[in-house]
Amino acid sequence: MGDHAAVRRLPPRRWRILSFLAQHGSTSTLDVALVCDVSRLTAHRDLAWLYEAGLVRRRRSEEDRTHTWWYEVTAEGVEVLRRDRTASGRSVPLQLGRRRPSLADALLFLPLLEVSRRNPGRCELFQWLATMETSAWLRQHDLAHLRADGYGVWLEDGRCLRFLVHVDSGPVGDAVAEREKRSSGLGGLLAGYRRIDPAVPVGAVLVIAQDAEREEQLLADLGREPLRARIAVTAREMLYRHWSNEQVWRLPEGSNARRLTDLTVDRSP
């Protein structure tokens, strides 16, 4: 199927899927169903159509016992998106179609989106910016020296939390001694905040540590050298076990875990 025929037949939801893939990297049928708020069967049909049109490709690992297909946008799909955005006067996002999947998407964006779907009217992920767009947002606020993995606005029970998120990727380097694994790489995670300790226009800076040991190390470091920004920390295992808006976030000044909206009293969206 050629480009023009495919574009003419693309309904809005398939444009959205194509755009999501181009800006977030590879994704599964379940993720697409969540993002588009449709059934898994509908998401599968849309992805199958895009695959047959040559706008996406798919792969699965032989080691994956679930045999899950992962979809990515093709060069043809990127060009279709680029031409459409240019023709309609919209800007073309940086690195369109060349972005790698983000841990912040998997650990926070998609889970919060699912909470929104399960609790309509009470919870809403009002805004989410991927890594590239977060960098642009930081530059607009004269905070170009900061690096974050995402920015979001979460609404729940009349409360509003604006947040930045950082994901700890674990020890840096291949040859890290066992005694250093707990702290290796943590110094650079919030280095931008320590450099000038800026006032950041968010209610909280969320940090997702690789494991519980590194979470404790982060909290200890922040207790010794506090920052102006409110830093809330959790570990990945907690986000796997609980909904991300529940009691999983800890502050350096207290050991009790807090809900996401308890990190701020801001009530405006």
Image (cartoon, rainbow, N blue to C red):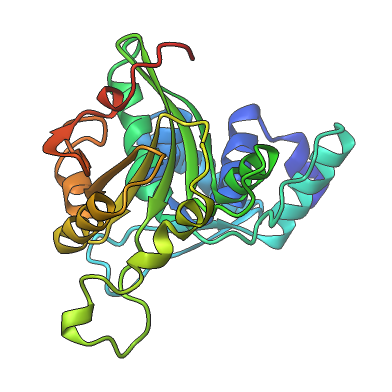
| Residue 46 horizontal/vertical position (percent) | 53, 40
Determine the residue located farthest toward the bottom in the rendered image: 175
Which one is in front, 184 or 30?
A: 184
256 to the left or right of 16: left
Which one is in front, 26 or 154?
A: 154
Residue 120 sits in quarter? top left
Residue 257 sits in quarter? top left
84 to the left or right of 46: right
Residue 115 sits in quarter? top left
Q: Which residue does the image show at 31% across and 12% down from the upper left?
A: 122
Which one is in front, 89 or 186?
A: 186
Indicate whether 6 appears above or below 95: above
Q: Which residue does the image show at 41% across and 51% down from the upper left?
A: 166
76 to the left or right of 242: right
The image shows a total of numbered marks equal to 0
Indicate whether 218 appears above or below 238: below
| Residue 73 horizontal/vertical position (percent) | 61, 56
3 to the left or right of 113: right
Q: Which residue does the image show at 47% across and 33% down from the upper left?
A: 152
Determine the residue located farthest toward the left in the rendered image: 256
| Residue 155 horizontal/vertical position (percent) | 38, 19
Q: Which residue does the image show at 56% across and 40% down from the upper left?
A: 17
